Amino acid sequence: MNELTGATETTGATTTAVVLAGYGPVGQAFVDRLARDGEALARRHGVRPRVAAVRASAAQCRPDAGGSVPPRSRWDPARPLDETFDRTGARVFVQAVPSSPGLRERAAEEALAALRRGIHVVTATKSHLLTHWRDLDAAARAGGSMIRISGATGAALPAGDLSRTSLRGLDCRTIRACPNGTATFVLDRLAEGDTLGDAIRAAQLRGIAEADPSADLSGDDAATKVRLLAALAWGWDPAEVRVRAEPVDGTTARRALAAAARSRRLRAVAGAAVAEPGVVRVRLEETEAGDPLHALTGPEKAAVFGCPDAGDVTVSGGRSSPVGAALALVKDTVEVTAARTGFH
């Protein structure tokens, strides 16, 4: 292995060492995907990411040659992150830790440390993106590294990629999105006559909603994702964005039923506009046929980017699940490590 790059050349593919922080459902799915799809990634993209270390709050381990992670009882005490980077020759630091206030500072400190060393950061963790955006950007520029956040902006929905690069030159002026699958699912169940409690339980039984769905139903999660999309598209600092959110609550069932009676669907729509800088609004809107947000069913998500001359650009679908988030991490890991020549 090249100790400076953390890469080796095997059969024409570059094997790149990855350090993973967080081993919950998303982290586990990420490890499994790399172990399962490593050969396919090498053939298709010329890069084979390999998880060289997995870190939790107080312990860490090194997977075996096949990518299998040992049982927790065999993990070692956590070592300083810089030491782990040195020992593994890491080129990518992947974050799959919960987006909780209590973990925000640690997530920020670890991401900043990686970026300053020239190690790329791929994250599904949102909390530190909202508070340390400018610092993370400055650290990446200083270290010559990249940070990618697809897993934080919609799991497998590639809305972040659109905001970051694909809309360049199209003069995008508005973002209108339903980026929270739980809210969409619950609103559809309310329109079918369920109570709010029944709709939430149905979402939880299907693995769509968290045990505590308050961030989904308050509009906070949708607002967070649009804050990040606006930051990518227009350079907003998420920490300075003001949020105005209308929740899904006990009064919403009546509105959902009324909308359904008019062949409409009630949606929790998060929006931002260049004309109103630094503001994200989440509204309960009645949508009509022909609106991409009206067409969503179950936990599906979508984002519509309004470009006056180019026309609206819409992305929809993308599984909202640990596997979907893990695939977003895989995609971003490949992007920051694969060679870019020709059509690639």
Image: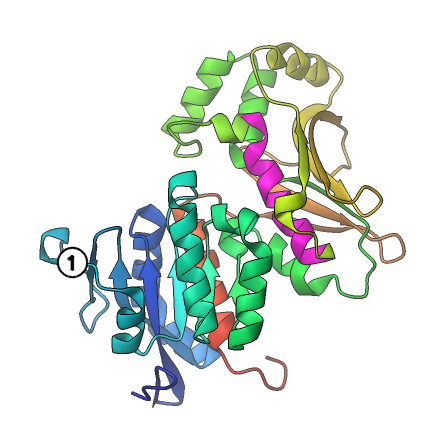
The quarter in which the N terminus is drawn is bottom left
- Residue at the image position 60 percent from the left and 58 percent from the top: 134
> What percent of the width, then of the height, locates residue 295?
67, 36
Name the amino acid, label 1. Answer: Pro
- Residue at the image position 44 percent from the left and 31 percent from the top: 209
Q: Is residue 26 above or below residue 248?
A: below
Residue 153 shows up from this direction? no
Residue 56 shows up from this direction? yes
Viewer-side residue, 275 vs 252: 275
Q: Main secondary structure of the magenta part?
A: helix
Q: Label 1: which residue?
A: 77
Q: Is residue 220 magenta?
A: yes
- Residue at the image position 21 percent from the left and 59 percent from the top: 78
Q: How many numbered discs, if any?
A: 1
Q: Is residue 44 above or below residue 130?
A: below
Query: Magenta residues, as a range?
Result: 218-233
Q: Is residue 172 above or below residue 5?
A: above
Mark 1: which secondary structure?
Answer: strand
- Residue at the image position 68 percent from the left and 14 percent from the top: 255
The answer to whether residue 93 is left or right of residue 60 is right
What crowding class fits label 1: few (fewer than 14 Cα within 10 Å), some (14-19), or many (20 or more)? few
> What percent of the width, then of the height, locates residue 100?
41, 40
Q: Quadrant of residue 293?
A: top right
Viewer-side residue, 339 vs 299: 339
> What percent of the width, then of the height, locates residue 42?
40, 78
